[in-house]
């Protein structure tokens, strides 16, 4: 059994177990704004997830999807795909695992870390670790050895704790059957939603109610710490003309880094296809896209890809084979399909979007590789060299300017450096910058500067900056007169929420006394909606974080079709009504059990 657990540590069984742990240990909440540098977006067993970490994870998540969509990702798509929730869920998952490592006393020793790094092929020459090559590759990636080793230690610790947890699992045949049922069983509910917005316009709080709310909730109106700075910006793009690589440099780079100029030629891949009909509306496309994102999350969390493809794929030719496409060569599929499929690592899952629909792709094996054509290799090498040298020149210029700013007015340094002096408005630690967008490093440094103080060189996504403090404001609670409208709105929202709660309770009482659901919905003026079947793992409306609704739905039955009270989720009250439940096919369990027992 231990052998099976290790081998199938990414299976639906382990994914369900880890999901259950997450449900137990997550405590959602947002911390106060006394110091935005310590502002919490969530707390996991008392361990805060800070806004700065969340912003970085969110930016990384957006960047990944931008690559998949060829830069066509927009705000509507970000919202539809719930990228903010995805970013937060990843941080919560990591925090849970790190807490488990702490409880179990699991560590990554220096020897383990060094051994792992020494075995990476790209740090080796002639099969042996090469210190010079190690330093050179890290420098090209703008990473210090300390930063890289810290990241690698973190990754190894997560890997180690997952292996440890899964190695302890012992599951009897009866337990396995029960967990299989919990993983595959589906339930379907009908539901009504009562929103506070329906009652908001009717709220007119008195001055006394406003004053009382302000006194009891002052932290809610605390303004965050803010800063205003001047800065000099050295864009990497401004140094490209000076950084053009020579033909000899390109040749040497290709010779020194042969592994960077090969690509997969033939792969074996599995596909789960969700088709988008030609005349689909925008809403229908979003619904299909949401389903694709939910399935992608399941696969990346460890759900077995084969049964997912067998159940959900709309490619009739491959779904019974678990989506197995066999050997695939470049050019057999649309370019956007190839871009995702041929960029995956073994066992990695990605999402490609074509005119046909949404393609979940899992790379099983790289069968053949080939050297890039010389023209393509030289072009790629030139891009690498140009980017590295441009960034290095920009950093050197920023370092030189900083040294001069310590004793010379910033305007003179700017003129000498050929850049302009820029100044921010008052910004918090999490606000995007005018013209530059989100720059967490910039904001964090700006919060630390006193007036006239010069910062160290700050690395940004588009270059480097040197900051000079202008103004700093501590977090504070404004007097009621200055935030009265904001307080009035908060009181109105609270009163509307209370009224929505009372209305939802009245409707549920009518349902539990036997009034028909359709009659109650019609008289309340609420649309009666259908969830469609979902599993515990998928969650209500394909929302894994909606545990309060998912858990309640699975407790309903034809004998007890309504929960005891309305369910509150994301500022709405839900009234669920049981519709149907479907147990997994016993033959499916038999096939799964036989496969696992034989492993």
Image (cartoon, helix red, strand yellow):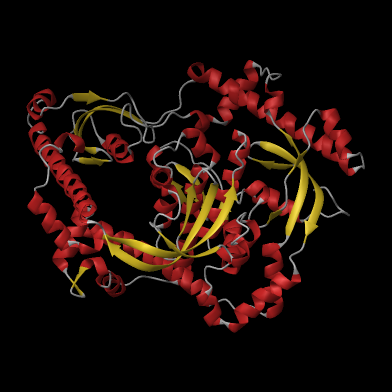
Q: Is residue 470 left or right of residue 215?
A: left
Answer above or below: position of 461 versus 471: below
Along the line of sight, the residue nearer the viewer: 281 or 193: 281
Q: Where does the image place residue 227, in percent across and percent down from the top left?
A: 31, 29
Q: Is residue 129 above or below residue 250?
A: below
Front in this rendered view, residue 38 or 404: 404
State the residue at coordinates (52%, 54%). Answer: 360
Horizontal and vertical percent position of residue 145: 22, 60
Q: Vertically, is 429 above or below 547?
A: above
Number of numbered tags placed on the structure image: 0
Left or right position of 418 against 302: left
Q: Residue at x 72, y 61 (%)?
A: 185
Specify the farthest residue to the right.
514
Report the quarter where the N terminus lies: bottom right
- In the drawing, does residue 207 fall left or right of residue 498? left
Near-viewer residue (156 or 229): 156
Q: Is 122 left or right of 506, judged from the image as shown?
A: left
Where residue 434 sits: x, y (%)?
33, 26
- Tell me if residue 17 can be seen: no
Q: Relative to residue 487, is residue 87 depicted above or below?
A: below
Look at 45% across and 69% down and name the residue there.
Answer: 161
Q: Quadrant of the C terminus?
A: bottom right
Picture quadrant of residue 447: top left
Q: Is residue 292 visible?
A: yes
Q: Position of residue 98 (x, y in %)?
A: 45, 62
């Amino acid at each position: 059994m231990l052998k099976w657990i290790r081998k199938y540590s990414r299976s639906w069984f382990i994914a369900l177990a880890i999901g259950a742990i997450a449900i137990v240990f997550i405590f959602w909440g947002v911390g106060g704004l006394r110091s935005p540098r310590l502002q919490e977006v969530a707390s996991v067993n008392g361990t805060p997830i800070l806004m700065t970490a969340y912003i970085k994870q969110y930016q990384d998540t957006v960047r990944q999807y931008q690559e998949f969509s060829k830069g066509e990702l927009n705000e509507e798509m970000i919202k539809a795909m719930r990228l903010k929730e995805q970013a937060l869920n990843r941080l919560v998952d990591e925090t849970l695992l790190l807490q488990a490592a702490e409880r179990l006393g699991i560590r990554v020793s220096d020897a383990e870390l060094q051994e792992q790094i020494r075995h990476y092929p790209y740090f080796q020459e002639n099969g042996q670790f090469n210190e010079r090559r190690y330093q050179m590759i890290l420098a090209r990636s703008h990473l210090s050895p300390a930063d890289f080793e810290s990241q690698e230690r973190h990754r190894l610790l997560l890997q180690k704790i997952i292996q440890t947890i899964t190695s302890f699992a012992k599951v009897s045949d009866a337990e396995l059957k029960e967990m299989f049922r919990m993983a595959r069983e589906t339930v379907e509910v009908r539901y009504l939603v009562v929103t506070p917005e329906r009652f908001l316009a009717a709220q007119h709080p008195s001055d006394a109610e406003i004053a009382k709310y302000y006194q009891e909730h002052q932290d809610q109106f605390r303004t965050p710490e803010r800063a205003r700075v001047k800065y000099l910006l050295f864009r990497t793009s401004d140094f490209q003309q000076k950084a053009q690589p020579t033909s000899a440099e390109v040749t040497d780079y290709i010779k020194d880094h042969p592994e960077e100029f090969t690509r997969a030629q033939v792969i074996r891949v599995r596909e789960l296809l969700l088709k988008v009909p030609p005349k689909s509306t925008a809403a229908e496309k979003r619904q299909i896209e949401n389903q694709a994102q939910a399935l992608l999350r399941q696969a990346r969390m460890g759900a077995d890809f084969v049964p997912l493809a067998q159940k959900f794929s709309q490619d009739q030719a491959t779904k019974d084979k678990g989506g197995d496409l066999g050997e695939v060569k470049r050019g057999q599929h649309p370019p956007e399909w190839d871009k995702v499929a041929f960029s995956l690592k073994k066992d990695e899952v990605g999402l490609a979007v074509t005119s046909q629909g949404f393609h979940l792709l899992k790379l099983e094996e790289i069968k053949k590789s080939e050297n890039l054509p010389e023209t393509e290799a030289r072009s790629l090498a030139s891009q690498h060299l140009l980017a590295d040298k441009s960034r290095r020149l920009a950093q050197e210029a920023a370092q030189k300017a900083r040294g001069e700013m310590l004793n010379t007015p910033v305007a003179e340094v700017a003129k000498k450096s050929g850049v302009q002096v820029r100044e921010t408005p008052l910004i918090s630690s999490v606000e995007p910058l005018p013209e530059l967008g989100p720059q967490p490093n910039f904001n964090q440094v700006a919060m630390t500067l006193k007036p006239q103080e010069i910062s160290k060189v700050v690395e940004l996504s588009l270059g480097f900056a040197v900051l000079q403090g202008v103004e700093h404001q501590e977090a504070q609670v404004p007097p009621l007169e200055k935030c009265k409208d904001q307080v009035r709105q908060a009181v109105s929202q609270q009163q509307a929420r209370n009224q929505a709660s009372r209305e939802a309770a009245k409707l549920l009482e009518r349902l539990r006394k036997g009034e028909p659901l359709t009659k109650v919905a019609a008289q309340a003026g609420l649309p009666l909606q259908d969830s469609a079947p979902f599993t515990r793992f998928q969650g209500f409306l394909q929302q894994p974080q909606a545990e309060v609704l998912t858990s309640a739905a699975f407790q309903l039955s034809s004998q007890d079709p309504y929960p005891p009270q309305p369910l509150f989720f994301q500022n709405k009250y839900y009234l669920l009504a049981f519709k149907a439940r479907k147990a997994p096919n016993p033959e499916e369990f038999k096939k799964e059990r036989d496969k696992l027992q034989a492993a």
